[in-house]
Image (tube, grey):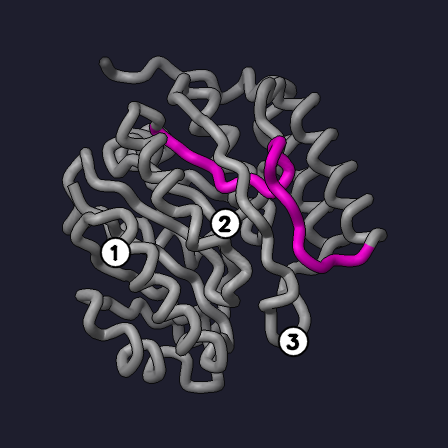
């Protein structure tokens, strides 16, 4: 078993020095071999070159988009690159490039995957989780959107839906890609990760959460997520998949 990190990045050069240290620490805590796929989604600040310099020791592959293609394309192409070398039992870790992910908790997420979870969510909203530095208005909007998604898709027992911080079993991702014709995320923006979660849940895979701290204070500059645009994306995903994701229930191979 190995870890394969998939990290989308748009103009995150200044964050990579800290990110490299934290990833090294997280890998050591997990005691597993690791690879890294960084998706440079049209950066203009030299993110890709900086990644090669700072993260090259991690069997790094940089997937370069000549222009910004968005979150869904970054994850789709990152997952495809990761699956080229991953066995079904390997774990594909996704997290933010801006150091807001609680990498100190990665060993706990990995332990849940070792115990049989197909998808493990790092959740700042789960009991024991927290958000370090965000404004009240953003928390209200995010909380309302989470409630809407949870009720619409009948995602009982889950508290977070849009976080990038996740651990995926590689074999599970292969099944989801196969079931969707290679397009598990048809929504292009940040809501695409909600779409992927709903598809995974609808196929009957085991999804669990681990409480983490969202480190908003670590972010340099403004968040690239636009709340209003993302909430509209949630509505598109709701219409695409239907209540309870009933339109997407497919029989998994056993």
Residue at 48% over, 59% down: 96
Q: Quadrant of residue 62?
A: bottom left
| Front-lying residue, 149 or 54 | 54
Give the spatial CA distance, label 3 vs label 1.
Answer: 29 Å
| Front-lying residue, 130 or 219 | 130
Q: Earlier in the sequence, mark 3 or mark 1?
A: 1
Give neighbour class at mark 1: few <14, some 14-19, many 20+ (Cα, 10 Å).
few
Give the spatial CA distance, label 2 vs label 3.
Answer: 18 Å
Give neighbour class at mark 2: few <14, some 14-19, many 20+ (Cα, 10 Å).
many
Residue 33, x across and y down, in percent: 17, 53
Residue at 21% over, 49% down: 31
Residue 70, x across and y down, in percent: 52, 61
Which stretch did the figure color magenta? 118-135
| Mark nearer the viewer, 3 or 1 | 1
Q: Where is 189 relative to 61, above or below?
A: above
Query: Which residue is label 1 attached to?
Result: 28
Q: Where is 13 relative to 84, above or below?
A: below
Instruction: Assign a secondary structure to mark 2.
Output: loop
Query: Which residue is label 3 attached to?
Result: 221
Residues marked 2 and 1 touching at CB (< 8 Å): no
Instruction: Assign a secondary structure to mark 1.
Output: helix
Q: Is residue 119 magenta?
A: yes
User: Where is the N terminus found, in terms of image quarters?
Assistant: top left
Residue at 56% over, 21% down: 245
User: Where is the C terminus found, in terms of image quarters?
Assistant: top left
Give neighbour class at mark 3: few <14, some 14-19, many 20+ (Cα, 10 Å).
few
Q: Which mark is residue 164?
A: 2
Residue 20, x across and y down, in percent: 35, 70
């Amino acid at each position: 078993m190995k870890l394969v990190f998939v990290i989308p990045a748009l103009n995150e050069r200044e964050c990579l020095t800290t990110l490299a240290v934290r990833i090294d620490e997280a890998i050591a805590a997990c005691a597993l071999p690791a690879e890294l796929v960084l998706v440079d989604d049209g950066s203009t600040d030299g993110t890709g070159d900086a990644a090669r310099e700072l993260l090259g020791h991690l069997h790094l592959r940089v997937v370069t988009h000549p222009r910004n293609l968005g979150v869904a394309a970054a994850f789709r192409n990152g997952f495809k690159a990761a699956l080229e070398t991953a066995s079904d039992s390997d774990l594909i870790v996704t997290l933010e490039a801006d150091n807001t992910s609680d990498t100190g908790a990665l060993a706990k997420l990995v332990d849940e995957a070792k115990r049989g979870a197909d998808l493990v969510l790092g959740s700042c909203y789960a009991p024991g989780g927290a958000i370090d530095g965000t404004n009240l208005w953003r928390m209200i909007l995010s909380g309302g959107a989470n409630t809407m998604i949870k009720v619409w898709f009948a995602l009982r027992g889950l508290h977070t839906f849009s976080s990038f911080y996740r651990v995926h079993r590689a074999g599970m991702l292969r099944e989801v890609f196969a079931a969707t014709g290679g397009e598990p995320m048809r929504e292009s923006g940040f809501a695409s990760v909600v779409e992927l979660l709903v598809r995974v849940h609808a196929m009957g895979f085991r999804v669990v959460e681990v409480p983490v701290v969202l480190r908003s204070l670590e972010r340099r500059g403004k968040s690239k997520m636009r709340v209003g645009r993302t909430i509209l994306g949630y509505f598109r995903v709701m219409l695409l998949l239907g209540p309870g994701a009933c339109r997407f229930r497919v029989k998994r191979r056993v």
